[in-house]
């Protein structure tokens, strides 16, 4: 009887504990999302990588005034869940990929590079973006610098990170860039990723990866 009573007490307190943990986790998640949203709103200006080539977040891709002031004419969206914000004002190309290590972004390198080149030939400028402007879009820009300007992977990534410190492709994309480097130069360089830590690098893959 006593044993059963003890078990009953334990089982009756478990749902309450589970509920408390659930609420606590939800609050922490909400606080994280609020912080992310604040940073996202502030990160709304394209970063100039080189003449005619910009890199940024979806907020930057939505900032029509900033885009116009930068003479952006073409927008390369490297994300599956984002739709053109101003389809009547810019030429768009959408690469429908998610930010996961097993995503084959390398398969799109050539068409992305061609899109950037065509925009430049027409006297325009291109914004390459994903959601945060950290992994997918950075990978495409780094591939462009490697293929069109003969940079090593290390040189290209360090150049991008010097302008946009949040830049940090996922490990799968780094491997694909190493494959590209090997095909271009015959030997992958030693890559030391920027250890810069900030709020954006702490975002776990979820809605922001789609």
Image (spheres, grey):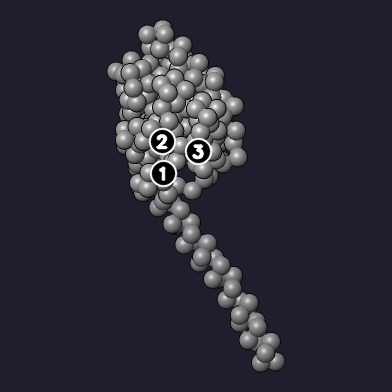
Mark 1 = which residue? 192
Q: Quadrant of the N terminus?
A: bottom right
Mark 2 = which residue? 154
- First reached walking from the N terminus: tag 2 or tag 3: 2
Q: Residue 168 appears in which quarter of the rendering? A: top left
The mark found on residue 174 in the picture is: 3
- Picture residue at 43% right of the left edge, 57% below the top: 28
Q: Quadrant of the C terminus?
A: top right
- First reached walking from the N terminus: tag 3 or tag 1: 3
Q: Is residue 162 above or below residue 116?
A: below
Labels 2 & 1 near each other (Cβ < 8 A) = yes
Extreme top residue here?
A: 122
- Picture residue at 48% right of the left edge, 56% below the top: 26
Q: Position of residue 41 (x, y in %)?
A: 35, 36
Extreme left residue here?
A: 69
In the displayed structure, does residue 186 sit left or right of residue 52?
right
Circle 3 packing at 10 Å, graded few (<14), some (14-19), many (20+), is some
In the displayed structure, does residue 35 sit left or right of residue 115?
left
Labels 2 & 3 near each other (Cβ < 8 A) = no
Q: Is residue 45 above or below residue 135?
A: above
Residue 179 visible in the picture: yes
Which element is circle 2 on? helix
Which element is circle 3 on? helix
Question: Residue 146 versus residue 70: which sits nearer the camera?
Answer: 146
Extreme bottom residue here?
A: 2
Circle 1 packing at 10 Å, graded few (<14), some (14-19), many (20+), is few
Residue 85 visible in the picture: no
Which element is circle 1 on? loop
Question: Residue 207 versus residue 136: which sits nearer the camera?
Answer: 136
- Picture residue at 61% right of the left edge, 82% below the top: 9
**Count of labels shown?**
3
């Amino acid at each position: 009887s006593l044993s059963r009573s003890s078990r009953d007490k334990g089982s009756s307190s478990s749902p309450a504990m589970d509920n408390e943990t659930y609420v606590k986790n939800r609050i922490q998640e909400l606080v994280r999302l609020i912080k992310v949203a604040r940073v996202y709103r502030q990160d709304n200006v394209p970063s100039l990588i080189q003449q005619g080539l910009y890199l940024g977040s979806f907020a930057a891709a939505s900032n029509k005034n900033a885009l116009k002031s930068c003479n952006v004419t073409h927008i390369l969206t490297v994300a599956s869940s984002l739709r053109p914000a101003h389809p009547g004002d810019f030429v768009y190309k959408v690469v429908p990929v998610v930010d996961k290590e097993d995503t084959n972004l390398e398969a799109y390198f050539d068409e992305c590079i061609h899109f950037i080149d065509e925009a430049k030939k027409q006297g325009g400028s291109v914004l390459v973006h994903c959601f945060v402007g950290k992994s997918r879009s950075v990978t495409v820009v780094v591939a462009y610098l490697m293929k069109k300007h003969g940079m090593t992977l290390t040189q290209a990534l360090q150049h991008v990170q010097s302008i946009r410190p949040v830049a940090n492709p996922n490990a799968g994309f780094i491997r694909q860039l190493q494959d590209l480097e090997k095909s271009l130069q015959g030997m992958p360089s030693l890559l030391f990723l920027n250890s810069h830590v900030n709020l954006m690098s702490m975002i776990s893959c979820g809605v922001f990866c789609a």
